[in-house]
């Protein structure tokens, strides 16, 4: 038996498929009633506005990409605890954790 955590799943997915990957996670609990969490989350990661209802419900996903540029484009549109990115000026209450991985199953960077 082998127990896999979220990062091991990302590593294994990338290595087995020989694709670049990114794990994302977020919470819809923004601790402030004045914010609509789904609106804020979609601002922090605009690609989640594209038919990602299940991801929004689950609060996490593993994304696989055919090329490095596409992965970095998504990563650079994902606003985490560090605040706005080169491609996303969002500076609101939502933050999306992102961890990238190469096709060899090696982690490259995270946005914390």
Image (cartoon, rainbow, N blue to C red):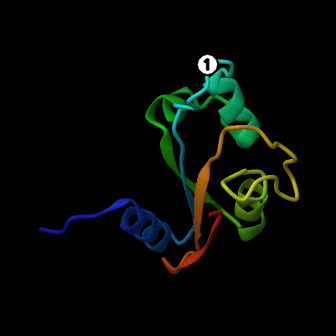
Residue drawn 67% across the image and 53% down it: 80
Q: Nearer the viewer, residue 107 or 103?
A: 107
Query: Of helix, strand and loop, which one carries label 1?
Result: loop
Residue drawn 57% across the image and 68% down it: 19
Q: How many marks?
A: 1
Q: Is residue 65 above or below residue 47?
A: below
Outermost residue, front direction?
A: 32
Q: Quadrant of the C terminus?
A: bottom right
Residue drawn 66% across the image and 39% down it: 94
Q: Is residue 27 above or below residue 51?
A: below
Q: Would you identify the image quadrant in which residue 66 lies?
A: bottom right
Q: Is residue 82 left or right of residue 102?
A: right
User: How many residues crowd mark 1 within 10 Å: few (<14), some (14–19), many (20+)?
Assistant: few
Residue drawn 73% across the image and 54% down it: 74
| Image spot of residue 96 (x, y percent) | 62, 48
Q: Nearer the viewer, residue 88 or 112?
A: 112
Instruction: Name the residue that disc number 1 marks.
Output: 33
Q: Would you identify the image quadrant in which residue 64 lies?
A: bottom right
| Image spot of residue 61 (x, y percent) | 50, 47
Q: Quadrant of the N terminus?
A: bottom left
| Image spot of residue 76 (x, y percent) | 78, 58
């Amino acid at each position: 038996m082998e127990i896999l955590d979220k990062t091991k799943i990302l590593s294994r997915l990338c290595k087995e498929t020989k694709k670049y990957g990114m794990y994302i996670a977020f919470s819809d609990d923004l601790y402030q009633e004045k914010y609509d969490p789904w609106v804020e989350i979609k601002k922090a990661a605009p690609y989640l506005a594209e038919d990602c209802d299940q991801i929004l419900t689950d609060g996490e996903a593993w994304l696989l990409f055919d090329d490095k540029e596409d992965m970095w484009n998504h990563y650079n549109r994902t606003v985490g605890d560090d605040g706005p990115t080169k491609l996303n000026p969002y500076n609101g209450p939502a933050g999306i954790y992102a961890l990238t991985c190469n096709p060899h199953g090696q982690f490259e960077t995270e946005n914390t």
